Amino acid sequence: MNITVIGTGYVGLVTAACLAEVGHHVCGIDCDQHKLDKLAEGIMPIHEPGLEAIVCRNMQAGHLSFTSDYAAGVASAEVVFLAVGTPPDEDGSADLSHVLAAAKETARYVQRDCLLVTKSTVPVGTGEKVEAVVAEVLASRGGSLCIHVASNPEFLREGQAVNDFLKPDRIIVGIEHAGDAAIFRRLYAPFNRNRDRLVLMDRKSAEITKYAANAMLATRISFMNEIGRLCDRVGADVEAVRIGLGSDPRIGPHFLYAGVGYGGSCFPKDVKALRATGLEYGEPLQVIDAVHEVNEQQRLRFARQVRDSLAACERPRVALWGLAFKPGTDDMREAPSRLLVDTLLQQGVSIRAYDPAAMDVCRAIWPDQPGIEFMHSPESCLPGADALVVVTEWLCFREPDWPEVERLMPGRILFDGRNLYDPELMRQRGWQHYCIGRGRPYPET
């Protein structure tokens, strides 16, 4: 099939590359010519394992191309995906200006009947707004072109997006015309060979499903962070609670880890947008309100704890391990490390920081910022440090060489924002070990 993907950001680039990988002819459109020039050189705009190989392979095979020219990019498309940004407005609602602009350009330049699909995360009712824009443009053009509008939200995990797309557990599709189901079945046939993963529903239900899924996962995180606070108060261990909860098949083990709070491009934005949708329709979402508030407080609480622990130091210095909001990505959007870094810098704390993927992104966030240095390894952060703070659970931080750590840094304060280390072992080594919800060690046997 001839596919066009508008937007070559995280969702759009992964979608374009993976559809090309299974044999479709895909054109990606983006207004950022610098990004397109880099893609032509095989340089990816994001860090995503496996993506570079797929993009380069399919560009060389002629299955994947990129352009900034709408007329050329959409002319022969059978399916056009809208994968542009939907940043939050001041009230938390999603800004649909990029989506509607891309829909308008598609309707202006497409030369055949096609299916226009919102891949971006958009609030309920967006499909109707896209339809209205398309209808207006087609009316001005005259003729008999037909463009149907559908919803096909993405469920990609950063750091595992390529695998998630190529091996999906479900493909949510919202349509208003029964005949459009056949187009999606043809489009996704390569992913459905051993079982049918296509879940068909109406368009509004598909739009809500995306938000509801992310909000549910965010809810589990905030819930466990509240349980972690209670564990600290009463002297229980949230890790034991997590294992007990996760062993219940009705609950399951996923997204039950207490920590410094969620971040990234999806959970914060989507929780806020879902809250805004509820208010717009006169249905305040009290659980979602609490999820957001707990997460905000969790990040702030952690930053204050680190700051206060260094109050007695004359010239405090921190070694910071991990900056990206999660392992496997360089995404710094809403990362808990951002609040932490800004809080410490405001208090005159010097920071040496390392992240396996996000260093270039961080240098752009804090360009020439006094007080923070970006280092080349975890060990290079340690000399002179009063405290070690772990924010992102990269594999390279899981099993440090503690004798070497202790040789390099004079301080013995550890803020374990992801509960990576055993509190009792760290106590035995002489560390002040602050973690999340681990009020006491396991009983001795």
Image: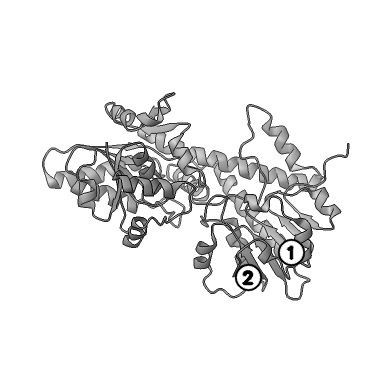
Secondary structure of the residue carrying tag 2 is: helix
Task: Tell me the residue that label 2 is attached to.
Answer: 345
Q: Residue at x 73, y 33 (%)?
A: 244
- The relative height of residue 72 versus residue 338 in the rendered view (above or below) is above
Task: Tell me the residue that label 1 is attached to.
Answer: 387
Q: Quick one: label 2 or label 1, which is nearer the N terminus?
A: 2
- The relative height of residue 329 versus residue 443 in the rendered view (above or below) is below
The image quadrant of residue 148 is: top left
The disc at residue 379 is: none
The amino acid at mark 1 is Ala
- In this rendering, position of residue 388 left or right of residue 376: right
What whole-number distance in Å separates the C-alpha atoms at marks 2 and 1?
15 Å
Q: How is the image coloured?
A: one colour
- In this rendering, position of residue 53 left or right of residue 61: right
- The relative height of residue 350 versus residue 379 in the rendered view (above or below) is below
Q: Residue furthest left?
A: 143
Q: Is residue 123 visible?
A: yes
Q: Residue at x 48, y 53 (%)?
A: 47
Q: Residue at x 47, y 43 (%)?
A: 161
